[in-house]
Image (cartoon, rainbow, N blue to C red):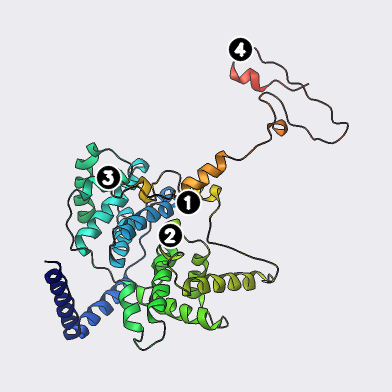
Amino acid sequence: MTSHLAAGHRLEIRSHDYLLQEYRNDIHSHFIHLDYLFRQRPSPLPLQPQLQPNRFALLNSIFDVVEKLSWSYATFTLAVTVLDRYLSKALVLEKNYKLVGYCCLWIAFKFNENKPKGKLVNALIKRAGYDLDRKSDFLRLEMDILSALKWDLSMPSADYFVNFYTNNSQPNLKERMEGAIFLCELAHFDRNLFYSYPPSSIAAASIMLTNAALTGATDKLDDLQHSLLHQVLAVPSSVRAKYFNSGNRIIPHLTSLATQVLHKTRGLDTQYVSYSPHHASPVQELVLYPNLPISPIASPIHQHHRHSHARSQSLTALRSLHIDTACLPTPGTTPVSSAAGASQVTPVEVPLDLDERSAKRRRYL
């Protein structure tokens, strides 16, 4: 039975490749047209800029789901563009921001993935941090998003252009393509970068950067390539989990290239200055991802793993820190210099029956 299924799968792949070759020119013309429309379309400006600081953490969580479920690059791209386009047309409460993001992922999944849905809606709602009683809101939001976008989900994908631009005869083809896709995925997390250049340009710049990382040539990098290298120094945890333990030799070269370019731009000496973007500090992770589950441990659609996630390790490390409380001021006192001869300042006790205004007028003796 297994052998018959494997043979059928190989036959399906062979038929798929044959059809792609037959309609290769038509497919390419379609993507070129979509890329042209992307250039002509104005960048979606958010109606609520106060929500933009949460965009990085939300995309980090969405990317984690896409990667763990083996969904395609096009699904992640479509989810990001649908989210940004909808937020440029509709006002969203901050408490519903994550629900909107995962609803956009649900739309992108149904558009691109040919996989059984099952109870995926329930899992996405839980992953976003909501109870299942919001399911009706989730499904109603799906219709609102599609209506606001006029059911237009056409979006060029940079991974197509990466496949189109690369030569099958190149050495280390798989690693080069993974390095280029790595840079294309990082571009999503910078809104200005993602909408300032079409996917074809981002794909071409990513391929040239992977070649430059292998050769060490950094003299002729344009603004787009500099922006992509800047993203390499701020890799989200979900992208880091996908690539930095994959054994791909291009990724360390890209990290080294980004560090060299950064130091060269700032006039620093790379011999004495080191930068390691592989591990974010606990404080950085808590600031970037305060509310969103970003690991399979927090996801209802995955089983628990044996190893703890980096965020859990960060919290444990913070709790284990020893803090010398002797140097901290006690409540109701004013901290003073520890220099010799510093006089102790004693505050005046404020009676409880005084109002707040009179309490503020009190002065320390």
Kindly identify which residue carries mark 3: 125
Furthest residue to the bottom? 169
The answer to which of marks 3 and 4 sits earlier in the sequence is 3
Q: CA distance from mark 3 to mark 4?
A: 47 Å
Q: Quadrant of the C terminus?
A: top right
Kindly identify which residue carries mark 1: 310
205 up-or-down from 85: above or below: below
Q: Choose mark 2 or mark 4, whichever is in front.
A: 2
Query: How many discs appear?
Result: 4
The answer to which of marks 2 and 1 sits earlier in the sequence is 2
Looking at the rendered structure, the kind of residue marked 1 is Ala
Kindly identify which residue carries mark 2: 241
Q: CA distance from mark 1 to mark 4?
A: 46 Å
Q: Residues within 10 Å of mark 3 (few under 14, many from 20)?
A: many
Q: Residue at x 36, y 45 (%)?
A: 298
Q: CA distance from mark 2 to mark 1?
A: 10 Å
Instruction: Tell me whether the residue at label 3 lies in contact with that at label 4, contact meaning CB atoms closer than 8 angstroms.
Output: no
Q: Choose mark 3 or mark 4, whichever is in front.
A: 3
